[in-house]
Image (spheres, rainbow, N blue to C red):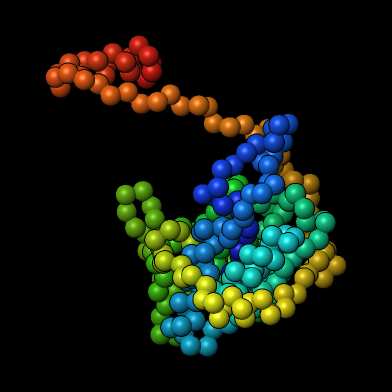
Amino acid sequence: MKIIVCVKSVPDTAAPIRVKPDSSTIDSEGLPFVMNPYDEFAVEEALRIRERHGQAEITAISVGGIRAKEVLRVALSMGVDGAIQVADPNFEDLDSLGIARVLAKVAGKLTFDLLLCGKQAVDVDSAQVGPGLAEILGLPQIGVVTKLEFDYSWRTLRAHRQVEGATEIVEASLPCVITTQKGLNEPRYPSLKGILAAKKKEIPEWNHSQLESVELSPSRVKTLALEDPPHRKPGRLLAGEVEDQVKELVRLLREEAKVI
């Protein structure tokens, strides 16, 4: 079995985010970047599939510059077999559709049985790259997956996915595209041996010419401005008897918050 995992470098969600004075984008100076958390679930699931299958080969792909290479090193240190960095000035500032087209071109040049992506990237939150990949490649797709099972032949899978108030179980034949959700697994930490080995591995760089006429159109999504969320007032504690607290709470909701 051959597995492709798409990964992305995103700002660390635990770090404070600052907007540039001109409101054009975030200030990335000194900001730590990490592998997209949902992509970590995809990498971990690929590794677990290989452990069960015994002969699976995993390739991680990322689009971007130095940060893309860094996140590919993380994937290699976790245990994936190989990585491809897609770096080209033509691929800068692409929207989700553009990224999906680039990744689809790369995947089309590789042999694979399963393509895994995180359900969304925590910086853009569009959740469009995985479904876009499936559409462009003409493959079945199952999104927001929290459990994966394979039949004895490893040619059919059964995926459990989240729906409102329930779990939906979907079967698909390989090859197919899966987007991963929190709860699918618990990603492992890279071992020291894995980190040292990842530093020595060569990561080939692909560019526009190697992908042969990938369709690139101007981004259909443009960010007009960014701004910090409005400052929230501190909470208030109500004193007195419960009945008095309820009356005061209703008054505050009606007169100050104006939500009822």
The x, y position of residue 208, in whole percent, is 82, 64
Q: How many numbered marks, from 0 up?
A: 0
> Where residue 150 sits in the image (x, y, percent)?
42, 77
Q: Which residue: 72% across, 74% down?
A: 203
Compare residues 120 and 220 and report the one nearer the observer: 120
Q: Is residue 146 visible?
A: yes
Relative to residue 117, is residue 252 drawn left or right?
Answer: left
The image quarter containing residue 229 is: top right
- Residue placed most toward the observer, 9 or 86: 9
Q: Position of residue 51 (x, y in %)?
A: 46, 83
Q: Quadrant of residue 161?
A: bottom left
Does residue 137 appear in this view? no
Eyeballing the image, is 249 above or below 177? above
Q: Quadrant of the N terminus?
A: bottom right
Quarter of the image with the C terminus is: top left
The residue shown at (73%, 51%) is: 94
Residue 153: percent from the left, percent from the top? 45, 85
Of all residues, the one furthest to the bottom in this rendering is 55
Residue furthest right as drawn: 209
Residue 75 or residue 254, whichever sits in front: 75
Q: Residue at x 59, y 48 (%)?
A: 123
Tell me what residue is drawn at x 54 percent, y 83 percent: 56
Residue sitting nearer the eye, 224 or 107: 224
Please indicate whether residue 232 sits to the left or right of residue 227 in the image. Answer: left
